[in-house]
Image (cartoon, helix red, strand yellow):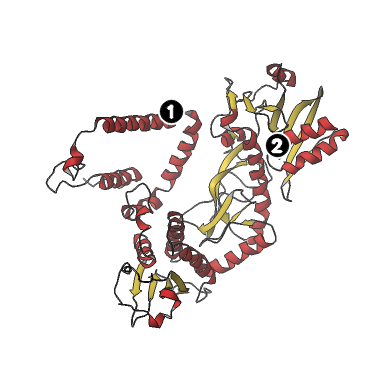
Amino acid sequence: MAAPSQTVASAIHTLFRERTTRPAGGGYAHPYASRKGKDRELNLDGQLALVRSIREALEGARGLLEGAEHRDRLARALKEVAGHQAALLPLATTLYTLPSSSSSSAHLVSLAPVQLLVALAGALGIQTYQEDSQFGLLKTSLALAGTRFVVDVDLETDAPGGADDGDADGDGQDGPAPEPAAGDEPRGKVRLSKLTVNYVGGAGEGAPARSEWLERVLRQRVEAVLEPDEAGIDALRAELSDLKVLDDAASDAEYYADLEPLAAGIQERAADGRVHEMGRHVFPTFQLYEAGPTLCTRPARPGEVLPPTEEGPVEYAVTSRWTLEVVGDMVVRGSWLGGPGTAESTTRVESLLYGAPFPYLADFVHPAGAGGRAQHWSVALSGPDGYVLSRLPFTSWATLDALVPRLRAQAVLGALFTTCFAPAHLAAVADTDADAQAEPVSLDSLLDGLEGEDGIAVSAAHGEADVRLSLMLEAREVELVVEPTEEAPYVRVTCDDVDLQDAVAAAATRGRDLVEVVRLFVQAASGA
């Protein structure tokens, strides 16, 4: 009988057993027995605290699995894992090399820069070649080599007291320098004197011999770990991991030839304000607006099928060499491409943005701010259908330029929602069906709960391209329309009441924070 094929579950189980089971030895049989006799004494308080922490962890896990707030997110994550099982299984080799400590970089902080680079590269399967100091020079050359790239790094240690390197004593041996004796001058700091990235055979037709983009990215990350800290080490590991992904993918397409023009195109669009550049990374990354959703370019995975970027039937999908990946996913309306929503769009945008079935008619309370009044927000009518967008094909610059404004509009609509309907502000949950169309309610009924309070009731309705707010102002009902625009701060506030235009102008200065929009509008209108 043939052995069963490996699955993600079996790979994770094997990895778990490997990382948590230690062989018996050293004079004791229990895999977790203490190595020191004095530590074997029973500490009742410590044991009770450990049992309590285990119980709290189990209760937290049970709440995560049973709670409706996280169930939909967990289901989407499991579907994503199942859909990429073939790509995830090879990661087991890399996972085995990771340390088992709670902080994956804590054990690397004490390493010298050269040793740190060797350790990170080795864990990712990147070969290293080291040439140590010779003839008294405090200099180490290191080469990181993949299949189609070579990164040459030269690290120099400044001589004590600012003397020339040639006058310093060097022993040419491996390992960190010995601690200076009392009265001796300490050795100077390590500095990066050279970093180059060269492509070797097989990089693809049109690929340059040298990558200026990768040099700038890696130089920034290496310089950050010359005095190591965990954040800098994690950032360098991420860039080297992406470099390995790029190198592995280059066997199927000419990704190295694409990288320089891709980075230049993103920087050009960031310079003229069409996107917001998110630092330098191996795979060029940008934001739709400052502090907004992040999109990262990456090579398309083998056999990856991507959603369409223009109107088409539900079964229509595309393939491309590069993929635009939305970091953290983003909720879009089914009609975000300009046409009617597809048949796959079966969940209301409120529930997707809320992360659970949305409690229609529930009261979301925002306490009074400086000089303001408490606000009570609710949604009476369910909005349009939507879905979670995680990636898109990158087929051309023209397509990207057409997609960015539409994606930004969806991101702004989502940000408007989350400013006022965060779970932390939920006061009461109505017993309603989240997917059913709720009956409209009057503002009078919403105001019933505010008798005796100096509060404002705001009813929000989410449309295909805007958010409409209804509130009572001096015994009259006022409607504000908040919609995305293509100019920063990418929000426009309008009102049909001609007497309130100054108040509308004051509210519009708060951008994507609807609570502040209402607060400034009411203050300006009350003072008019």
The residue carrying pointer 2 sits among few (fewer than 14), some (14 to 19) or many (20 or more) residues within 10 Å by Cα, namely some
| Quadrant for the C terminus in the image | top right
Mark-to-mark CA distance, 2 and 1: 35 Å
Residue at x-position 38% and y-position 57% = 109
Is residue 361 positioned above or below 327 on the image? above
Is residue 358 positioned above or below 257 on the image? above
Marks 1 and 2: in contact by CB < 8 Å? no
- Relative image position of residue 330 (x, y in whole percent): 58, 44
Q: Which residue is mark 2?
A: 516
- Relative image position of residue 390 (x, y in whole percent): 54, 47
* Amino acid type assigned to the residue bearing label 1 in the image: Glu
Q: Quadrant of residue 376?
A: top right
* Amino acid type assigned to the residue bearing label 2 in the image: Glu
| Quadrant for the N terminus in the image | top left
**Looking at the image, is mark 2 or mark 1 nearer the viewer?**
2
Furthest residue toward left: 27
Query: 247 or 16: nearer the eye?
Result: 16
Is residue 299 positioned above or below 148 on the image? above
**Would you say 213 lies left or right of 80 here?**
right
Q: Which numbered disc flags the more N-terminal residue, 2 or 1?
A: 1
- Relative image position of residue 389 (x, y in whole percent): 56, 45
Is residue 320 among the parts visible in the rendering? no
Q: Quadrant of residue 12?
A: top left
Disc 2 element: helix
Q: Which residue is mark 1?
A: 66
Residue at x-position 66% and y-position 26% = 378
Residue at x-position 82% and y-position 32% = 525
Q: Quadrant of residue 451?
A: top right
